[in-house]
Amino acid sequence: MREAIITGYGVFTAFGFGAEALEFRVFAGRSTFAKVGRFNPAPYHAKYAAEYPCFPTPSQDNVLRRCVVDALSMAGHDAAGTAVLLGINDDPSNSLQTPKSADVNNATGRLPDILADEFGFGRPRLTFSDACVSTTNAIAYGTLLINSGTRASA
């Protein structure tokens, strides 16, 4: 079995953009859960959530582009030939809008191809959008690709 090492990642969480924001607040024991403030939660059971720190929430394509740049910077290499495995919590209201795909149906499924074309990534190109575990599933699949010898990097 080959060793799989995560060399770079990009994140946008309720703590903000980037690994440093996430690490600093998690290691400091901070929480982002508070009363919902962006809408009236009265019709719902949950009255508390971890909301994004900026309003309005950036578009999905801008968030993902920034995460790609952060991941590549952290890894210290370019995207050439690397597989694209996105772990995102899909929100249909944040569909990708680019000049090449102004009215894309199922934009989430096309995100890896759009980002791969822009940054020069290789294959496979997959999106994991299964809510909270999406990133874990993307990492696990990348590890499987590396361990099987199918990919040198993912």
Image: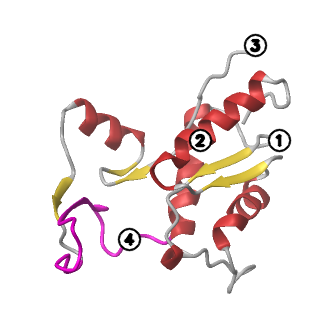
Between disc 4 and disc 3, the foreground one is 3
Residue 154 visible within the image: yes
Q: Is residue 95 rendered to the left or right of residue 53? A: right
Whether residue 18 is situated above or below residue 144 in the rendered picture = below
Mark 2 and mark 3 residues within 8 Å of each other at the beta carbon: no
Foreground mark, 2 or 1, reads 2
Kind of residue indicated by mark 4: Thr
Work out whether 74 lies above or below 18: above
Relative image position of residue 28 (x, y in whole percent): 19, 32
Image disc number at residue 64: none
- Cβ–Cβ below 8 Å for labels 4 and 1? no
Of badges 1 and 3, the one in the foreground is 3
- Crowding around mark 1 (Cα neighbors within 10 Å: few <14, some 14 to 19, many 20+) is some
* Quadrant position of the N terminus in the picture: top right
**What residue is shown with label 4?**
57
Region rendered in magenta? 39-59
Residue type at mark 3 is Met
Q: Earlier in the sequence, mark 4 or mark 3?
A: 3
Residue 127 percent coordinates (x, y): 66, 55
Q: Which residue is mark 2?
A: 137
The label shown at residue 81 is 1
- How many numbered discs? 4
Identified by mark 1, the residue type is: Gly
Category of crowding for the residue at label 2, using alpha-carbon neighbours closer than 10 angstroms: few (below 14), some (14–19), many (at least 20) = some
